[in-house]
Amino acid sequence: MESVAEAQHTLVLDPSGLGALPAHTRTRTPTALASDAIVEGGRGIMGERQVERFLHMVSSGVEAAREGQTDPTRLALSEVSRHTVPEVSCRMSTLMAARWQGSCRSLSEFPADVPHQSSLDATSLSLLHTSPELTDEAFWRRIRPLVDPKTLLRTEVTETPNLQRLMRSVIQAWKAHVCMVAEPEVVRPGVRGAGSSTKDTSACAAPASWPSWPPTAKDLHAPDEYEAPLLAEVRERASRFGIPLTSIRMLMTNRSIGYDAPGEDVAHDP
């Protein structure tokens, strides 16, 4: 009966197995991700013991992938492959592969056959964003090449610590058609931001839900008038995030002065 259920991509979950699933939480812990995999695409016959085994092995594997540990990652991938439909299995494998690469391990060493992707898909990126916060800045630098703006906008994730960390990383490398950096109160409710202010962030980069691609300046919904920051504030923000300022325009009443040196940081020139 179990082999038939697996072959037909059907899940038979008895009451004790249902009771073993954790309650839904907004933060997608490794255990919650494993539970979602069962609910969205489980297959086979699962009672309490089987559900608990699945949750333990998969959540352990997700954590192990982050550390680049081969054996627990392989066991988790095997469990996912057996007990979930191919679509869900592929999604979980992609997530673990991304975490694996974030540990400085090559994708060629990953203990499963996964496509060598140039970027994460929207679902995998959403799972990564809603997972418990990853504070390792080096991890986000290594993930950066796997993320592109179009995919990020499709995730519809708006306020998570991991999204903030990703944005702080990609802002160093992405070349934007249009970019607005604004205090939180400047961003209107009609604009869905992909970044939001946190305690140690005085401004946020907010890719909006554009009506078309690439966006234009009018899509930003920027106010007609706004107070320009003082030079000291600009210097402090740039210094905090290690951003070189190669061009500055200073405003005073109806006059402006431009100062730039392509390729060189001019923020502290006397």
Image (tube, rainbow, N blue to C red):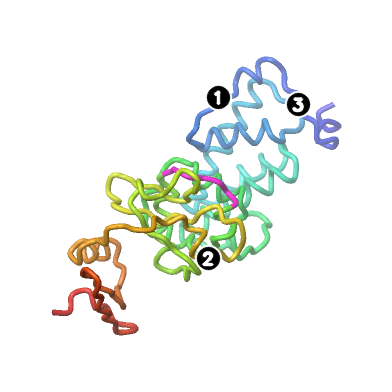
Among the 4 quarters of the image, the one containing residue 249: bottom left
Which quarter shows the C terminus? Answer: bottom left
Give the label on residue 45, or none.
3
Secondary structure at badge 2 equals loop
Spatial CA distance of label 3 from label 1 is: 18 Å
- Residue kind at label 3, given as amino acid type: Ile
Q: Position of residue 268 (x, y in %)?
A: 18, 75
Spatial CA distance of label 1 from label 2 is: 44 Å
Depth check: give the residue in front, 176 or 93. 176
Q: Marks 3 and 1: which is nearer the front? A: 1
- Residue kind at label 2, given as amino acid type: Thr
Spatial CA distance of label 2 from label 3 is: 52 Å
Depth check: give the residue in front, 59 or 225. 225
- Residue kind at label 1, given as amino acid type: Pro
Q: Position of residue 125 (x, y in %)?
A: 56, 51
The residue identified by callout 2 is 216
Residue 11 is one of the magenta-drawn residues = no
SS majority, magenta: loop
Q: Earlier in the sequence, mark 1 or mark 2?
A: 1
Q: Position of residue 188 (x, y in %)?
A: 43, 47
Q: Earlier in the sequence, mark 3 or mark 1?
A: 1
Secondary structure at badge 1 equals loop
Secondary structure at badge 3 equals strand
The residue identified by callout 1 is 22
Badge 2 crowding class, 10 Å Cα cut-off, few under 14, some 14 to 19, many 20 or more, is few
Q: Are marks 3 and 1 in contact (CB under 8 Å)?
A: no
Query: What's drawn in magenta, residue-wise?
Result: 154-160
